[in-house]
Amino acid sequence: MKISDRLASFSRLDLVGAVTPLQKLDRLSGMVGRDIYIKRDDTTPLAFGGNKLRKLEFLAADALRQGADTLVTAGAIQSNHVRQTAALAARLGLRCRALLENPTGTADGDYLHSGNRLLLDLFDAQAELVTSLDNAEAQLQALAERLRGEGRKPYVIPIGGSNPLGALGYVRAGLELAQQAKAMGLAFSAVVLASGSAGTHGGLAVALAHAMPETPVVGVTVSRSVAAQTPKVAGLIEGTAALLDVEVPAGLQVELWDEYFAPRYGEPNQAGLEAIRILAGTEGVLLDPVYTGKAMAGLLDGVARGQFAGDGPVLFLHTGGAPALFAYRNAIDVRIRTAATMIPATPAF
């Protein structure tokens, strides 16, 4: 049975609708001397878009099947995943409860109250600030138990929606991408994405191993070293393949770059902010300082250093996150103005 047939056997809410665009970044390509394409999952049609909606198609379908009345999840104060989960709960007439952590310990008012955090209030989600999410699975189960004691029917969604069921969203996205690439006559040298909770990375890797086996998936880590992130991605590849009852092709490698997330998760760095400025200024495309800005910094540096095999185009998976720009206003303002005095009109990537 084909992987697409296996995928079709799972319940799914049609939330994304039409395929997301696959576009060439013409000005950026001319600037760096290599064709760069972008898969626009930042344009998914709920709450400013983003990749989490693809995972929620499967997770929310399962929640409804189980008769849940409350979606329970967790993330950073500026979590894109929590934002889209809360929005979907509102759309489906469900409640949303979220555990939030402050990963950098910042007291910046924009971070604490603007961006994604502001949107949670608009979606009528109930958020609880915790010291850390170091034991998130147990913390979410404890919250779910409290809710059951109140007569609710909670459905727990892990951080990032990243379990094998959620990762099916990116198996589906990978098959969609393969069809688009074939129709456009494109053979990518690599697909580059931000690798965090790893569901997007794992699901995409499963799909492309079957549909575009010559194209490596390169994850730019946003919170962990290669040594720490590799088992997370590998585990989700294995778990997702097992859920679909398909084989993981022999020799499938998890490729990760960890040079771009410093100083830590949730804290902007100069390379990421430069990438944000470049994409905004050349293509009118908005990246964020936590995920896509750092991932694009990795892509640009990889092109400059000749890290991609051959001379084919490189694809960037845009996973969204633009609301966080407002939460990081102060850091962006200072560093973008500094970068503007340092970066030539034609960036030297």
Image (spheres, rainbow, N blue to C red):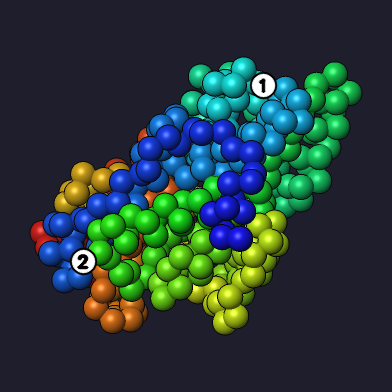
The image shows a total of numbered marks equal to: 2
> In the image as oriented, which residue stretches furthest toward the right?
149
Q: Which residue is mark 1?
A: 95
> Which percent across, then down, holds residue 267?
47, 52
Q: Residues within 10 Å of mark 2 (few under 14, many from 20)?
A: some
Residue located farthest toward the left when viewing the structure as drawn: 345
* Disc 2: which residue: 35
User: Which residue: 68% across, 45% down?
Assistant: 158
Amino acid type, residue under disc 1 in the picture = Arg
**Which residue sits at x=79%, y=33%?**
143
Among the 4 quarters of the image, the one containing residue 348:
bottom left
Q: Earlier in the sequence, mark 2 or mark 1?
A: 2
Residue 332, given in percent of the width and then of the height, sits at 33, 45
- In this orientation, which residue lies closer to the viewer: 294 or 101? 294
Q: Residue at left 51%, top 61%? A: 207
Amino acid type, mark 2: Asp
Spot occupied by residue 329 in the image (x, y as percentages of width and height): 36, 39
> Where's the C terminus, which quadrant?
bottom left
Q: Is residue 112 left or right of residue 39?
A: right
The residue positioned 64% from the left and 34% from the top of the image is 61
State the image quarter where residue 178 is shown.
Answer: bottom left
